Amino acid sequence: ETVLTQSPATLSLSPGEKATLSCRASQSVTTNLAWYQQKPGQAPRLLIYGASNRATGIPHRFSGSGSGTDFTLTISSLEPEDFALYYCQQRSDWMFSFGQGTKLEIK
Amino acid sequence: QVQLQESGPGLVKTSQTLSLTCTVSTGSTSSDDYYWSWIRQSPGKGLEWIGYIYYIGSTFYNPSLKSRVTISEDMSKNQFSLKMTSVTAADTAVYYCAASPMVRGTVTPHFAYWGQGAQVTVSS
């Protein structure tokens, strides 16, 4: 089973700053890596798929990069609505798994 | 745009069977163009993939849950379902149904659309 480790667990930043979230896989997942945003009481929302492709309707300030085992989600300039939980998710073989999440909080 | 809605009992007794249904709307797109998943989220285990179903009932399950889980579909009713047997308190979670596109007959490796989630509590 492929394990995803996200860092940091909590990231404290101010609106307008740049956020960099990391996700590391225990073995290569090529580019089968997605990122989700989750706000309290809501379901996760797909942001990035295929490591670097923005989902429909996702603002351009969100970008993803990486391949193999190391991936990054970057938010170029934080808006107030971006403070939330972020999860990465992978598929390898026919199994899916999620990281434990990064909480992006207002500093 | 795909819309999904979970339904089912919010409280299940220990050792009994959890049953949830997801009602889907795919608009003008054929339901054959998607595969259908169940995912759960609990404070202790985070987000956990349970399994998925596509085409003529082909299923794949998380090995850790496989012995207790069955996913079925009835797209004539625009629904797919989850059954989990012998539940314990560890199965208490928010259960989500999700839909993802098939591309050239292949499962895409992400979850594009989610239902709002259904809280299920297991208690004696």
Image (spheres, rainbow, N blue to C red):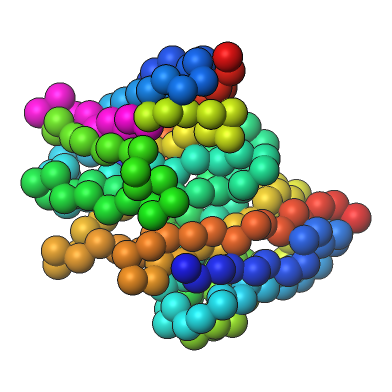
Task: Look at the image and tell me whether residue B11 can be seen.
Answer: yes
> Residue B66 versus residue B28: which sits nearer the camera?
B66
Q: Find residue B82 and report its horizontal and vertical position in percent.
A: 32, 32
Q: Residue at x 39, y 53 (%)?
A: B62
A10 within the magenta span: no
Q: Measured along the vertical axis of the image, is residue B93 above or below residue B99?
A: above
Q: Is residue A31 left or right of residue A37?
A: left
Magenta span covers which residues? Answer: B76-84
Q: Nearer the viewer, residue B61 or A22?
A: B61
* Residue at image location 53% in from the left, 33% down from the top: B91
Question: Which of the 4 image quarters holds residue A20?
Answer: bottom right
Q: Is residue B93 visible?
A: no
Q: Residue at x 62, y 32 (%)?
A: A41
Q: Residue at x 14, y 63 (%)?
A: B105
* The C terminus of chain A, quarter of image: bottom right
Give coordinates of residue A78: x percent, y percent: 74, 60
Q: How many marks?
A: 0
Q: Position of residue A18 (x, y in %)?
A: 76, 70
| Foreground pick, A59 / A102 | A102
What predominant SS class does the magenta segment belong to?
strand
Say which quarter of the image contains residue A6: bottom right
For residue A86, above or below residue B26: below
Where B112 sits versus A23, above or below? above
Q: Position of residue A52 (x, y in %)?
A: 48, 75
Residue A19 in which image quadrant: bottom right
Q: Nearer the viewer, residue A18 or A10?
A: A10
